[in-house]
Image (cartoon, rainbow, N blue to C red):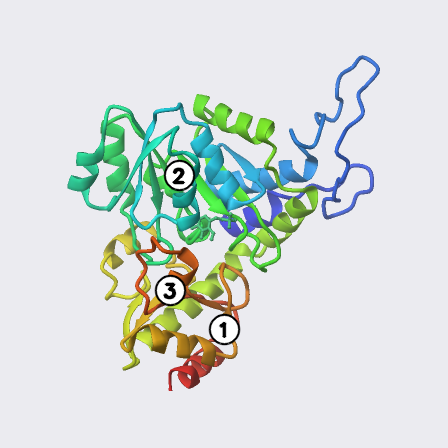
Amino acid sequence: MKIETIAIHAGNHIDDSSKAVVQPIVMSTTFERAVDGSFPSGYTYSRSSNPNRTLLENVLAKLEGGADAASFSSGNAAGMAVFQSLTPGTHIIAPDDMYHGLRNQLKNLFKDILTFDFIDVNNSEVLQQHIKPETGLIWLETPSNPLLKITDIKKVVSIARQNNIKVACDNTFATPICQQPFSLGAELVMHSSTKYFGGHSDLMGGVLITRDKNEWWQKIRQVQEFGGAVPSPMDCYMLVRSIKTLPYRMCGHVHNAQLLAEYLESHPKVEQVMYPGLPSHPQHQIAKEQMTGFGGMLSFTLRDGQEEAKRVINGLKLFTRATSLGGVESLIEHRATVEGPDTKTPFNLLRVSVGLEHIDDLIADMTQALS
Ligand code: PLP
């Protein structure tokens, strides 16, 4: 089946008793045993599993082309489950511009348990120099947040395989509509489903998807079940509902982002636009090879520095000043302020989550704010 069909059908199930076309929300935390003590429905307790979560995990696994998926209460909880699943002492290699929330997790919560290096993972020489006997995981994030850097997944995977290292990819910015890391050799895919999967800025969630149901995956499933950072049945229902339109929403985000990026690049007040769909993007060629769409996120820097960035952001009327991304409405933020003192993000940079408003209205708003 094609991805549009999977998105609509793989998370749905006609209810056996009511024949409701859309799966009802099962709020019950617990499920009745039969007289012999068994659980005829297969469900025991909602921390372990729940009918809405089963359907969500089914559609997520199929969208990425994986063997199984585990959903969490946030993207950070999903990332944390990966780190918790590793043997203490494992060394992780991660991008130098890894999403700051997960970088902070490693630096603050895992500093006595795991070791890690944040490097330019796209530079094969640097990558090879940092591999140690205890390196167990290379973490990728492509496109990256907020610099929109592209990592050549195939190239990293080939180095990782030679050294028996697993590769996990944060696919939040691309979504499976624009990039399928399993087809490029990754073992694990992570998403903040708060973003494009949810798509309406009204729910938190995270997901891990595995290519194979191996021992590592069993450990991750244990972290999910024993830790219990799971999404509620309501959140699972909302996600399944939103995912049905994900392929079409992504087409709109990609279309609008490309046109806005081109407009901004031609504007005299703009210093640089970071969008993988622009031929000027340093890794445009890699993006063309490994992505089927360039995503809905872009960043740009202003020639006149931080003050000008603030002036522009405050002058916009349609773009809301807010963190997060992937919703139908356009958002903009001064990323360095959000990331805190150890940020490597330039102070004249604004990050945009390009929404699904009409592109003419978005460009008109940007024009008046830049003028
Ligand atoms: N990964 C990326 C690339 C993100 O942008 C985010 C959130 O912004 C996360 C992970 C964390 O997700 P959440 O906020 O759902 O915990």
Give residue 283's mark. Answer: none
At which x and y percent is residue 203?
A: 61, 53
At which x and y percent is residue 362?
A: 47, 77
**Which residue lies most toward the top here?**
36
Q: Is mark 1 on a helix, strand or loop?
A: loop
Q: Given the image, on which type of amino acid does mark 3 rest?
A: Leu
The reply to whether the C-beta atoms of the residues labelled 1 and 3 are less than 8 Å apart is no
Q: Nearer the viewer, mark 3 or mark 2?
A: 2
User: How packed is label 1: few (under 14 Cα within 10 Å), some, or many (20 or more)?
Assistant: many
Q: Which of marks 1 and 2 is in front?
A: 2
The reply to whether the C-beta atoms of the residues labelled 1 and 2 are less than 8 Å apart is no
Q: Does the residue labelled 2 lie within 8 Å of ligand 1?
A: no
Which of 13 and 78 lies nearest the eye of the viewer?
78
Q: How many marks?
A: 3
Look at mark 1 in the image and give the residue it sits on: 319
Q: Is residue 190 left or right of residue 5?
A: left
Give residue 298's mark. Answer: 3
Which of 354 and 324 lies nearest the eye of the viewer?
324
Residue 348, by quadrant, is bottom left
Q: Distance between the residues labelled 1 and 3?
A: 13 Å
At which x and y percent is residue 357?
A: 52, 73
Q: Given the image, on which type of amino acid does mark 2 rest?
A: Leu
Give residue 106's mark. Answer: 2
User: How packed is label 3: few (under 14 Cα within 10 Å), some, or many (20 or more)?
Assistant: many
Residue 104, by quadrant, is top left
At which x and y percent is residue 333?
A: 44, 66
Q: Which of marks 1 and 2 is nearer the N terminus?
A: 2
- Residue 49, relative to residue 234: is it above or below? above
Quarter in which the C terminus is drawn:
bottom left
Residue pictured at 61% horizontal, 33% vertical: 228
